[in-house]
């Protein structure tokens, strides 16, 4: 069993690299998509990912209960790919339609912490291979608004927690993977 975190900036090639890891395993793949098609731009992004994905792979669309899906779909002899954690984080933050202040303290919804804990617990208990895609959003300027700062901070915390539980962590930039932890292949 290998748990891998593949992360990088927007359009860095991280999803394509993660897909290549899954394809090279020779095992059945369960692709867990966290995105919701809420507008035309997101529909286009989702269509791009679907077109690139191997048609033999099983796709599960789950925007919120990622821990449950990981627990249910992980099995010896398969690979579960999750794309992507920062989209999932955004889904959890905004799923109840809450409007957050641009100034002041952010109180994320309680279900965020419950789902985050359930996901991290499931990640520790998987029985098959897992490849998780996430964005690195903390390398730019510090965002001005409180909700944006909270998101950047929490995405960083989430990536750290996942990397600590994974045997492999790979940074992707310009389509080039750099293994930071674990086996190189």
Image (tube, grey):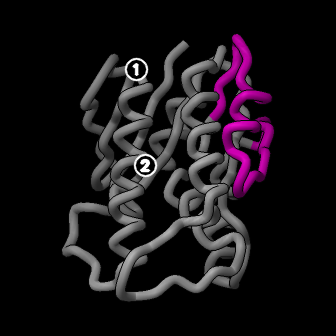
Label 2 crowding class (10 Å Cα cut-off): few <14, some 14-19, many 20+? many
Question: Going by the image, does 46 lie left or right of 171?
Answer: right
Foreground pick, 172 / 147 = 147
Query: Which image quarter: residue 147?
Result: bottom left
Q: Earlier in the sequence, mark 1 or mark 2?
A: 2
Q: Residue at x 40, y 37 (%)?
A: 161
Q: Is residue 102 visible to us here?
A: yes
Q: Residue at x 69, y 33 (%)?
A: 70
- Residue 12 in the image: above or below residue 75: below
Q: Is residue 48 visible to us here?
A: no
Count up the numbered dots: 2
Foreground pick, 52 / 70 = 70
Label 1 crowding class (10 Å Cα cut-off): few <14, some 14-19, many 20+? some
What residue range appears in magenta? 55-80
* Residue 124 spot, x, y in % from top left: 55, 22
Q: Which residue is mark 1?
A: 167
Q: Which residue is mark 2?
A: 14
Whether 58 is among the magenta residues is yes
Q: Residue at x 32, y 46 (%)?
A: 172
Foreground pick, 166 / 7 = 166
Which quadrant: the C terminus? top left
Distance from Cα at disc 1 to Cα at disc 2: 17 Å
Q: Residue at x 38, y 25 (%)?
A: 168
* Residue 60 spot, x, y in % from top left: 79, 45
């Amino acid at each position: 069993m290998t748990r891998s975190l593949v992360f990088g900036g927007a359009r860095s090639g991280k999803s394509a690299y993660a897909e290549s890891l899954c394809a090279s395993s020779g095992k059945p793949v369960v692709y867990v998509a966290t995105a919701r098609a809420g507008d035309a731009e997101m529909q286009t992004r989702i269509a791009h990912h679907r077109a690139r994905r191997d048609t033999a792979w099983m796709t599960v669309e789950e925007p919120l209960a990622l821990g449950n899906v990981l627990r249910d779909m992980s099995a010896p002899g398969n690979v579960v790919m999750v794309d992507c954690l920062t989209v999932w984080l955004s889904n959890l933050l905004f799923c109840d339609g809450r409007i957050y202040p641009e100034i002041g303290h952010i109180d994320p919804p309680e279900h965020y912490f419950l789902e985050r804990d359930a996901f991290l617990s499931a990640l520790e208990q998987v029985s098959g291979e897992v490849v998780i895609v996430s964005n690195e959003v903390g390398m730019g300027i510090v965002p001005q608004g409180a909700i944006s700062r909270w998101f950047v901070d929490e995405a960083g915390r989430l990536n750290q927690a996942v990397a600590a539980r994974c045997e492999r962590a790979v940074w992707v930039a310009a389509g080039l993977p750099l293994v930071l932890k674990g086996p190189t292949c």
